[in-house]
Amino acid sequence: MFGLFETGFSGLTLGPIVMLIIGCALLYLGIAKKMEPLLLVPIGFGVILTNLPFSGLMDTMVAGEVIDSYVIGAQPVGIMARIFYYGLTWEIVPVFIFLGLGALVDFGPLIANPKTLLLGAGAQFGVFFAFFVALMLGSAFPDILNIGIKEAASIGIIGGADGPTTIYLTNKLAPHFIGATAVAAYTYMALVPIIQPPIIRLLTSKKERQIYMKPQLRAVSKREKIFFPIAASFIIILLVPKSAPLIGMFMFGNLIKESGVTDRLAETAGNAFMNVLTILLGLAVGSFMSAETFLQAESMVVFVLGIIAFAASTAAGVLLAKLMNLFLKEKINPMIGAAGVSAVPMAARVVQRMGQQENPRNFLLMHAMGPNIAGVIGTATAAGIFLGMLG
Amino acid sequence: MAQEIIEVPITGKVISIEVKAGDTVQEGDVICYIESMKMENPILAPQAGTVTEIQISVGELVETGKTITILEYQG
């Protein structure tokens, strides 16, 4: 008989219903509001799929018995559980996304104006700030929150607004947090255009926001662009060895783009390959958000501290740019400091748009791309530092 | 009549031109859109004035510094 108990309806309790609403909300933001649809549509749909009861998508096997939820370390049975296990916990997907990113970015603005590297480093302040706040909260409320030093690092890294790095680090340090931190990181990346402008306005005067920067950056030679990823790999990996998987892939992706002799590889890495990985990552992250793993006090803390981390990173970037202006003869527009978080190119685009609104002569996109790309390097390096200390 | 040259601020491809010679524009009006780094970038009028000859065309790949048009204004 095809009775009610055999369908999914009997499993629709409050938890899954709340998660289904969240899934639909993510789809709405992606489709109707066009907020980072490439991320939010797969994540949102993954959330819906995994919370429709008895689908078995995230089933795992523990001691010979199939369990209808994802258990860390257990053998995956459901198809989404397998994608999550082999793609994410084996670290394949986030690391190769860095390869694709490398094949897409242009280090030209960073090479032309190396002082923007400082802004990318400054914007990592929020990572360490949230790390300490999370650590204090964890020790203040040990009965409610299970946040130790490794969990705190995974929460802090959200401040870099870099999805793949957040997943990579959390998987190494606090795998049970991976759903919450990944969703927080990707949601805040998508919400960059909403979160950053008020912070930037709060910390700058209209006059500062109107500071004009000449559109033309110094021309960067092909040779410089080829040397940069090689030299950066040497320096960063020698300094922070644990950053090697992310930085190594990022720089390799860039080298195949800039070398001029491997265009086919760069074309595939930056487009088709990246798209495949984005689909797998989005669905897998969304599928991890079942009611029982997500609707917990710790997940809420991850979300709140994540946004504090991100806001603090934005603020630190802007304030550092203002500080630099005290010493620079040719002033920089302090808004480009906000692009020091690594949401590429969302943060640079926000700065560009605000810059044009305040002064239609201004075209800050390339100036903001320098700190933005430096931010990617900065966050991956910060993750390497955490791994070196705690891994 | 004073003049101000509007230059291409970023290397890319012209995807549309929103004004024609003789049009009057206000500060902040869109002159054209240039696609660069997978983004549509609006190029805005730096001040109110009259557009003269348009020196770029749709589909053209333009380099930073190329003249888009010269804006004439009172002053």
Image (cartoon, rainbow, N blue to C red):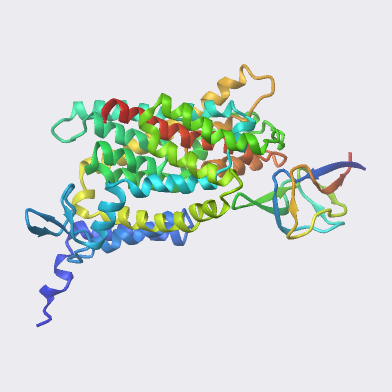
Classify A328 as above or below A28: above
Residue B54, image quadrant:
bottom right
Q: Quadrant of the C terminus of chain A?
A: top left
Residue at 39% from the left image edge and 58% from the top image edge: A279
Is residue A119 visible in the rendered structure shown here? yes
Classify A329 as above or below A6: above
Name the outermost residue toward the front: A261
Q: Nearer the viewer, residue A262 or A232?
A: A262
Q: Quadrant of the N terminus of chain A?
A: bottom left
Residue at 56% from the left image edge and 50% from the top image edge: A262
**Count the marks: how many?**
0
Along the horizontal axis of the image, is A183 left or right of A264? Answer: left
Residue at 37% from the left image edge and 38% from the top image edge: A158
Residue A23, image quadrant:
bottom left
On the image, the x and y values in percent for residue A41 come to 40, 59
Q: Nearer the viewer, residue B75 or A381?
A: A381
Along the horizontal axis of the image, is A300 left or right of A263? Answer: left
Q: Nearer the viewer, residue A60 or A40?
A: A60
Is residue A191 visible in the rendered structure shown here? no
On the image, the x and y values in percent for residue A38 come to 45, 57
Name the outermost residue toward the right: B1
On the image, the x and y values in percent for residue A204 come to 57, 29
Name the outermost residue toward the bottom: A1
On the image, the x and y values in percent for residue A213 come to 69, 33
